[in-house]
Image (tube, rainbow, N blue to C red):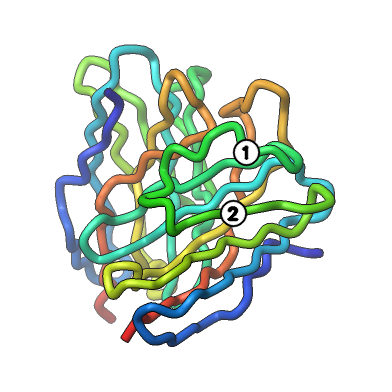
Amino acid sequence: GAGVSQSPSNKVTEKGKDVELRCDPISGHTALYWYRQSLGQGLEFLIYFQGNSAPDKSGLPSDRFSAERTGGSVSTLTIQRTQQEDSAVYLCASSKGTRWGSTQETQYFGPGTRLLVL
Amino acid sequence: AQSVTQLDSHVSVSEGTPVLLRCNYSSSYSPSLFWYVQHPNKGLQLLLKYTSAATLVKGINGFEAEFKKSETSFHLTKPSAHMSDAAEYFCVVTRMDSSYKLIFGSGTRLLVRP
C-alpha cells in the first residue's frame, strides 16, 4: 500500500475485555515496530519484528500484551484483560529492514489506533 | 543511557516569524538524531535526520537542524512559520545497542498565530 495502515482507528472497550489491533505495513518492508503514546509516558517502544520474528519484545509492559506477525506482513497487537492504564494511542511503523537494524532506515508511521478502556 | 530533552512543552509564534524548537541529547557515543512531526489525528512524519554526516541537516517543509556536539544540542529551526506548521514535534535519539529503537522526547507543541 501507499503507507502504513492501522485498524481500527478508534476502539472503546470495557475493562477486562481483550482487544486486537491490526497493522498493515508498507509493502515490501520487512521490519515492523509497535509504539505506544500515552499522556503519562509519552511515546515508548513496545516491540520490533524482523520478518515474522520478534527479536526485541523488551518494551511490552506486561504479559497481557502480545504481538504476532504472519507472512512477513500484517501484525496484530493483542491486549488481554484490558486495564484503564492501557488507554493510549498505539502506533505502528515499518521500515525496509536490514539484518542489523540500521539507523539509516526511516521508520514510517501509521495514523495509530486510539484505545479507550472504560 | 541515551535520552533527549525537549526544553519547551509549548512554543507560540506569529505566522512569518522564525521557529526555534530546542532539543538537548544525552549519549555516550555519537548518536543518530531525528525530528518527527505529528499533526492532529495523523501519523508521525519524519522531518529530518542526522547520522554523522553533515552537522547542518535540511529537512522537509523548510525545516533544518544543526548538530552541535559541544552543546549536546539538536535544535530545529525554520526561517518563517506557516499556519500549516502548527503540530507537535518530537526530538528522537536511537540507542547504541539497538539502533532500531527510537527514544522520543516529550514533545513540543507549536502554535502559529495569524
Q: Nearer the viewer, residue A69 or B84?
A: A69
Residue drawn 26% across the image and 36% down it? B4
Residue placed at 42% from the left, 69% from the top? A89
Res A59 seen here: yes
Residue A97 higher or lower than A102, as above or below:
below
**Quadrant placement of the N terminus of chain A:** bottom right
SS type, badge 1: strand
Residue to which mark 1 is pinned = A54
Residue holding disc 2: A67
Tell me whether the residue at label 2 lies in contact with that at label 1, contact meaning CB atoms closer than 8 angstroms.
yes
Which tag, 2 or 1, sits closer to the chain's start?
A: 1
Task: In the rendered view, tell whether residue B93 sits above or below residue B70.
Answer: below
Residue A42 relative to residue B12: left or right? right
Secondary structure of the residue carrying numbered label 2: strand
Q: Position of residue A66 (x, y in %)?
A: 53, 54
> Is B83 or A81 nearer to us in this picture?
A81
Q: Quadrant of the C terminus of chain A?
A: bottom left
Q: Residue at x 72, y 23 (%)?
A: A99
Q: Is residue B37 above or below residue B71?
A: below
Question: Can residue B78 be seen?
Answer: no
Q: Position of residue B71 (x, y in %)?
A: 19, 22
Residue A71 at what x, y percent from top left?
84, 51
